[in-house]
Image (cartoon, grey):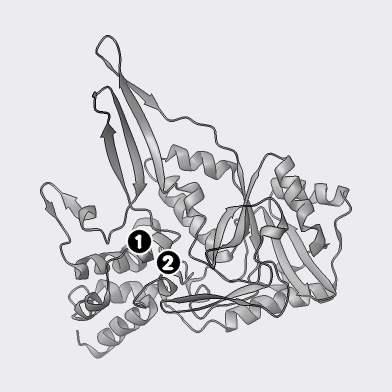
Amino acid sequence: MGEEAMKHFEERMPADKLDNLIEILKSDGFEIIGPQIKDQVIVYEPLTSKESLPQGYRESQEKGYYRLIRREDKAYFGYTLGPDSWKKYLFSPRERLWKSRKTSQGRVEFIGEDTEEKPQAFLGLRACELAAIRTQDQIFLEGPAVDKSYKKRREKAFLIAVQCMAVAPTCFCASMNTGPEVSHGFYLLLVEIPEQNDHRFLLKSASDRGKKVLSQLRDQKCLEPSSEKDLKISMQQVTDVREGQVRKMNPPKDKEVLEKSFDSSHWDEIAKRCLNCANCTMVCPTCFCSRVEDSTDLKGENAERWRQWDSCFNLDHSYIHGGNVRQSGKSRYRQWLSHKIASWVDQFGESGCVGCGRCIAWCPVGIDLTEEVKVFTNENNSGFN
């Protein structure tokens, strides 16, 4: 984050006032969704106080590996990323689209879904996660068909970003230009400084909704002026996270490489390892494949249509007019990686990967897309495939 941007952190809040922020959001009608520990991983679930946050924890992550470990401080947001993404709260994993019933006159009456859901405040978004939401906005809001359910949830959502202070070996957001600094897309930004005798947060608003919350915190005497020391620490956090990233991609070059690698024999080598389990697509914050399922009661009087998440790794996903387009695991992995890194750019103007690294950590056999792209790059450079 540039020095000019950091100057906007004019106020700070003691960490023990974090519950004041949560209570303000609750009083404004929001359900708070935030990070917490469940089944030994960081997940995003409803919370009612700062006591639910994963204070003092971080993760150890690598290919096919994830473990929670203790930090040396009491940071509330000192982790990187778990398997959850905010996608599940905007693009529901399973959602009823409509239902129908047969009337007494024998006609079929269709009933659309128009349920009112409580607005949600997302507490703890990282820069790469904000980028993922922007990507999903392109899909569900800016395409030829607007998804009404997504639109309703997105418009109500209150986005509270928290600057990264830790980096995992699986992170590569810097090379994807999606982080680590939070620059836009948020309503309120927090920077945590977990010093032992002065645990505090810097605060910055980027919208009228964010300014309103800051005003409410000010009225409750929760804020105080920030210092030059605060700004230097916040800038150093970003520098440390950026310089700590060991994995890198080259988006323009990678697109070109994958477009030239369709017939590479390396796809066969990947297919020998890939289980087609769909873990990578389930944890990915931008994947949007779905399918619809219809069900009817035994009397044939009531029917429902549901949409639920799907994956391009599932054989049935490519089923059309009597056959499957992608019969092999090789073709399905090639479709996923080529779409994510290459053809996604043709569709939406930017890569479908935000560099979060979830697909690396949560692949049970440790397939690393950054390493696979390097193999294709080396093949292209040597003229061999």
CB atoms at circles 2 and 1 under 8 Å apart?
A: yes
Question: Which of the 4 image quadrants contains residue 381?
Answer: bottom left
Please state if 97 lies on the left or on the right of 271 as rendered: right
Q: Is residue 147 visible?
A: yes
Question: At which x and y percent is residue 84?
Answer: 50, 60
User: How much space separates mark 2 and mark 1, taking CA atoms?
Assistant: 9 Å
Which residue does the image show at 27% across and 29% down from the upper left?
A: 297
Q: Secondary structure at mark 2?
A: loop
Please state if 146 lies on the left or on the right of 5 as rendered: left
Please state if 264 lies on the left or on the right of 377 as rendered: left
Question: At which x and y percent is residue 342?
Answer: 33, 67
Q: Which residue is mark 1?
A: 344
Q: Which residue is mark 2?
A: 353
Question: Which of the 4 image quadrants contains residue 50?
Answer: bottom right
From what the image shows, is residue 231 above or below residue 116? Answer: below
Which residue does the image show at 76% across and 52% down from the upper left?
A: 21
Question: Which of the 4 image quadrants contains residue 261?
Answer: bottom left
